[in-house]
Image (cartoon, rainbow, N blue to C red):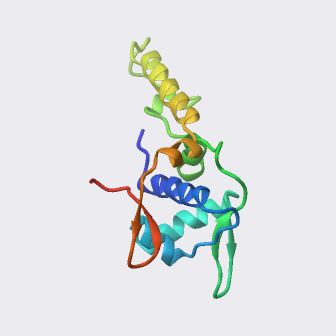
Amino acid sequence: MEVTKGTLYAVYVLIYFHRKPQGAVADLHTLSQILEAPESYLSKVLQQLHKSGYLNSHMGSKGGYQLSHPVEETTMRDVVLVMQGETLMQECLIEDYNCDRFRKCAVLHHVRDIQKVVDDLLSKLTIGQLAAEMEFKERQQKGFEQINIGVQ
């Protein structure tokens, strides 16, 4: 199972807005600079968050995106499902998957157990918890916060 860069950017966007005052609006350009993400890539992430109901979008010169509802209790698993859909470690975990390699597979139940542990961990990790752990550093020249997502 891979957590994609798009999913991580979605989490960072939700953390950014969660840490801002309620109703805060940020445009694509600003978010792109703060997250150090390409605008073309981040645009797709924002569209998906909007489509899934996490963000409202506003047109015009003072337009941009804002949270549509509090996300403190939104889990990492919720975001993974929105951005990537159901992610399984092995194709044999798909319901109705037919594997004819072995009469009895000794690996399947272990992979199923591992998948459950991963899903449980993602379900316990909330945007609120991540926001509390996230380090921000001030960008003096531009006067906005930058999420520290890179190597230090």
Percent of width and height locating residue 123: 58, 34
Q: Which residue sits furthest left?
A: 152
Q: Is residue 31 above or below residue 129?
A: below
Q: In the image, 66: left or right of 104?
A: right
Q: Name the residue rendered at 41%, 66% in the picture.
A: 138
The C terminus lies in quadrant: bottom left
Q: Which residue sits furthest right?
A: 69
Q: Name the residue rendered at 55%, 28% in the picture.
A: 120
Q: Which residue sits furthest bottom?
A: 61
Q: Is residue 130 above or below residue 152?
A: above
The N terminus lies in quadrant: top left
Q: Name the residue rendered at 47%, 71% in the picture.
A: 144
Q: Is residue 44 above or below residue 2?
A: below
Closer to the camera in the image, 51 or 23: 23
Percent of width and height locating residue 62: 65, 84
Numbered label tally: 0
Q: In the image, 85: left or right of 107?
A: right
